Structures are given as C-alpha cells and as structure tokens.
Amino acid sequence: MKSDELSTFAQNLSRIRKQRGLSQADLADLAGLTRRTINHYENHVSQPPIEKVEAIAQALGVKTSDLLDKNSKQARVQPAVDLSDIDPRSVKKLKDILSLPPNDRNVLYRMLNELLRKNQLEKKNKQSE
C-alpha cells in the first residue's frame, strides 16, 4: 500500500469507525486484531496487508473500497444491518444500551463479542462433526 493510500485508508478507517460508534478496542475485537494495531493504522504508523483491510471492512460492514477510496468521504456509509425488521423488545434493549455511559457500553460490547464468538465456534464444531 502506497503512503497516500495509507493516509486515505487511515482517514476513512477512523471516520467510518466513529460513524459506527465503535472504539478502537471494539473494532479490534470484531476484526480479530489488537487495539494497538487499529491505532497504528489510524495514525499512519504501519501499513496493513490486504487481508487485514478485508477483515476490518467486514467488521465495519463496508466494502474494502470504502476504506481505500479517496472519494468515499462523499459516499454515505450504509448501515451494517437493516434495522427495520427488529422486534420492539430488541429496539428497547438497544436504546437502554445506548443510554449507558460509554465505559459500561464498551464492557457490554466486549461481553457480547465473546458470547458471539463462542456461539460461532460451537456452530463450526457442530458442522464439522
């Protein structure tokens, strides 16, 4: 990745991550990276290999081009999930979560990430049996 591409990537990464309401640690958990790695990418310290760009894009629910394209600032980032069909109980819980202080929300997100990761592993194990 060229240095001007890294600058574009770093700017887009930071912008999209913040649009999603994610901390660097949250994104790192979702992408299977460390918070320090995300920080390095956002601050132009290191250049990510393409497989890391792909993992980050998937975690953010965007295309890799949204992270790499200089013109993606103008493109509206689509929500990772269509929320229109969510049941009212889940919407209320989401509102409750969003009303928590940021530190408490981050703790909850980390717990949720671990639970989701555990369930994914269980599904993979059942499929391989």
Image: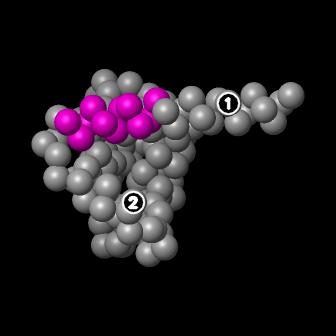
Relative height, residue 100 to residue 86 (above, below): above
Q: Residue at x 27, y 32 (%)?
A: 107
Seen in the picture, residue 4 relative to 109 is either above or below; the reply is below
Q: Amino acid at mark 1?
A: Glu
Q: Is residue 40 visible?
A: yes
**Residue 82 magenta-highlighted:** no
Towards the viewer: 64 or 30: 30
Per the image, label 1 sits on a secondary structure element best described as helix
Q: Quadrant of the C terminus?
A: top right
Task: Identify the residue at horizontal 31%, vertical 36% (top origin).
Answer: 108
Figure colour scheme = one colour
**Quadrant of residue 10 within the rendered picture:** top left
Q: Residues within 10 Å of mark 2 (few under 14, many from 20)?
A: few
Tell me the amino acid under the disc marked 2: Ser
Q: Residue furthest left?
A: 101
- The dot on residue 56 is none
**Which one is nearer the viewer's eye here, 12 or 28?**
28
CA–CA distance in space, label 1 to label 2: 24 Å
Looking at the image, is mark 1 or mark 2 earlier in the sequence? Answer: 2
Residue wearing tag 1: 122
Q: Which residue is mark 2?
A: 90
| 76 displayed left or right of 106 | right
Magenta-highlighted residues: 104-114
How far across and down, in percent of the image, does residue 81 sit? 47, 63
User: How many labels, in total?
Assistant: 2
Question: Whole-percent x and y of residue 101?
Answer: 13, 42
Between residues 77 and 91, which one lies in front from this camera angle?
91
Magenta highlight: main SS: helix
